[in-house]
Image (spheres, rainbow, N blue to C red):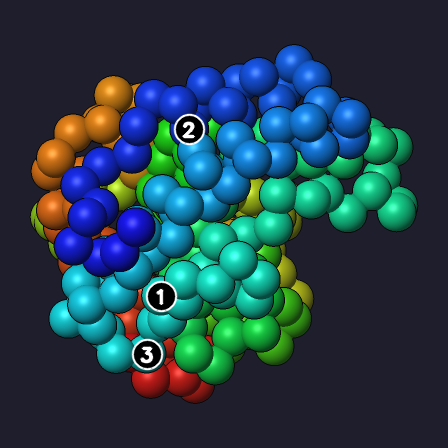
């Protein structure tokens, strides 16, 4: 299934994830491994391939890698070593188009999340490390006009909603009465856009995702500049 053949996802993908949520154990998954490959992995790889040239037109520094391991599709296996929840599998399909300089999910990127009860797009940086977080806060502090332009642009606010967690108090080095204090308190610099599940099955899905990512361009570019990477 290559780039040209991808038009949209099929309901069977969400159906598989729904069944996995009800049967989250290794025996069931191993018995349905062929379904996982054909109903989840194959269309996910085709989607990533189809997004590659579109992502290139938005920014040449974000990667669309159609590989089962080490690519844009995130692992289905949960890390349960230190978790109370020992269920072995994630019940969503996560696809991250990460910045070429990024090493993990905390890097600047664009994201697609497919789950039976929640389908959404993401853009920005989720839980950046201490150095990245300090850089973003410094960028907001030194360039408030650029930050406001990025986060208040009509195309961005029509398409995206800023979310994530924030500190209850001002971060160290900033006063509580700072004009941008609410944004400086953010621990996540992530924007999301919810999609109705049936949008996954529409021929215009690729166009819809591309248009949304384009609308987040200035926002992601500001974050990239703040952490010292190219957009």
Q: Looking at the image, is mark 2 or mark 1 nearer the viewer? A: 2
- The CA distance from mark 2 to mark 1 is 20 Å
Q: Which residue is mark 2?
A: 13
Helix, strand or loop at disc 1? Answer: loop
Q: Name the residue tied to disc 3.
A: 61
Reading the chain from its start, which is encountered first: label 2 or label 1? Answer: 2
Residue 106 percent location from the top left of the image: 56, 62
- Category of crowding for the residue at label 1, using alpha-carbon neighbours closer than 10 angstroms: few (below 14), some (14–19), many (at least 20): many
Left or right: 135, with 171 as reference point = left
Q: Is residue 33 left or right of residue 115?
A: right
- What residue is drawn where x is 62% and y is 28%? 32
Inter-mark Cα distance, 2 to 3: 29 Å
Question: Residue drawn at (78%, 31%), measured in percent from left and top?
Answer: 26
Residue drawn at the location 32% of the way across and 78% of the way down: 61
Vertical arrangement, residue 139 with respect to residue 76, above or below = below
Tell me the number on the disc at residue 64.
1
In the figure, 200 relative to 96: above or below?
above
Asked whether the beta carbons under mark 2 and mark 3 sit within 8 Å of each other, the answer is no
């Amino acid at each position: 299934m290559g780039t040209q053949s991808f038009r949209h996802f099929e309901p069977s993908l969400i159906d598989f994830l729904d069944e996995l949520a009800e049967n989250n154990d290794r025996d069931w998954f191993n018995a349905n491994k062929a379904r996982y490959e054909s109903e989840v992995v194959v269309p996910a790889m085709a989607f990533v391939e189809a997004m590659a040239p579109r992502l290139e037109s938005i920014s040449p520094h974000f990667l669309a890698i159609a590989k089962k391991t080490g690519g844009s599709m995130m692992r289905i296996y949960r890390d349960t070593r230190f978790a109370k929840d020992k269920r072995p599998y994630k019940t969503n399909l996560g696809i991250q188009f990460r910045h070429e300089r990024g090493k993990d999910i905390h890097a600047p990127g664009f994201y697609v999340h497919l789950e039976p009860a929640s389908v959404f797009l993401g853009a920005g940086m989720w839980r950046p490390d201490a150095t990245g977080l300090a850089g973003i806060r410094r960028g907001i502090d030194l360039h408030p006009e650029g930050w406001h332009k990025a986060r208040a642009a009509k195309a961005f606010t029509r398409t995206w909603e800023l979310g994530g967690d924030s500190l209850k108090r001002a971060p160290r080095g900033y006063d509580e009465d700072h004009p941008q204090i609410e944004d400086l308190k953010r621990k996540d610099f992530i924007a999301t856009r919810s999609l109705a599940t049936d949008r996954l099955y529409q021929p215009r899905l690729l166009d819809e995702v591309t248009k949304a990512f384009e609308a987040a361009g200035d926002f992601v570019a500001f974050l990239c500049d703040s952490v010292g990477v190219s957009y």
